[in-house]
Image: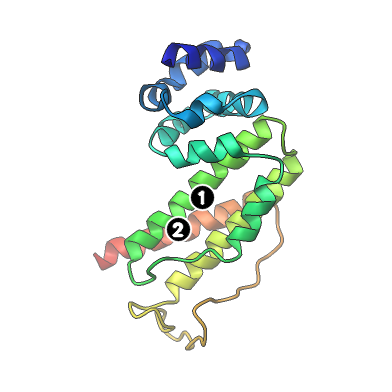
Amino acid sequence: MSDALRKRLIDAVPTLSERVTAAAEPLLALRSEDPAFRQLDGPMLLGLARAISTHTETAGFLSHRPALLERLARATASTLSETERALESWAFEDVEDLESCLDALRLLRREETVVAGCLQYAGINSFDEVSRFLSILAETITQRALELALANREGTGGGLVGAPQWAGPNLEIPIFAGTWWFHSLAALLAVAALGWLAARRG
């Protein structure tokens, strides 16, 4: 089965056959029997092949995320807009567990970036649509990271010296409407800063 899937990936992007063959090995080794992988076809198979050949770490990441493969197999042109609505209510399971919260933010960023990238490579969503989605994703991550920084171990305001006591569990912060890469950089810096704080606390 892995040979058949390898051939399908290569056929999707014949000009990048060598890169696809090498990059796809982790994914083929662990997920070649997954129904979702076998269901990938047409534009989404092309999008996945391009993503793997362009960002070689994608195959390794997907090999440990069977649920993400299932999302890719079901992805349509409306997937990004549906995810945007879901991001509005995205929240931490336990704000007191800083390490788990940081892991959740990293996983959210990586999973949604992979989905958006595959959709763009597949030609299902335009560059502008993907850029808008990534900007919203970065805003969400930045908002949640700031909420986490402003929360103490009891999940209430006061995590920063001089910070006021916030009435609700969520903190709304105005975000500068810059380009998508600006928001992505801000989100990465926020997560990195929280990781540093977690290391110092530990």
Q: Residues within 10 Å of mark 1 (few under 14, many from 20)?
A: some
Give the image location of residue 33, x and y in percent: 41, 24
Give the image location of residue 139, x and y in percent: 60, 60
Q: Is residue 167 left or right of residue 178?
A: left
Q: Amino acid at mark 2?
A: Val
Q: Residues within 10 Å of mark 2 (few under 14, many from 20)?
A: many
Give the image location of residue 163, x and y in percent: 47, 84
Of 86 and 145, the residue lying toward us:
86
Q: Residue at x 38, y 37 (%)?
A: 64
Q: Going from the N terminus, do you reach mark 1 or mark 2 first?
A: 1
Q: Give the residue at the far front of this rendering.
A: 35
Q: Tell me: residue 54, above or below residue 199.
A: above
Q: Tell me: residue 125, above or below residue 4.
A: below
Work out which quarter of the rendered image holds the N terminus and state it: top left
Q: Tell me: residue 8, above or below residue 56.
A: above
Give the image location of residue 13, x and y in percent: 62, 16
Res 202 quadrant in image:
bottom left
Task: Report if residue 180 is visible in the image.
Answer: no
Label 2: which secondary element: helix
Q: From the viewer's perspective, is the residue at label 1 or at label 2 nearer?
A: 1
Q: Tell me: residue 189, above or below residue 80.
A: below
Pointers 1 and 2 in contact (C-beta within 8 Å)? yes
Q: Give the residue at the far left of this rendering.
A: 202
Q: Residue at x 47, y 29 (%)?
A: 35
Q: Residue at x 44, y 11 (%)?
A: 3
Q: Which residue is mark 2?
A: 191
Q: Which residue is mark 1?
A: 109
Q: CA distance from mark 1 to mark 2?
A: 10 Å
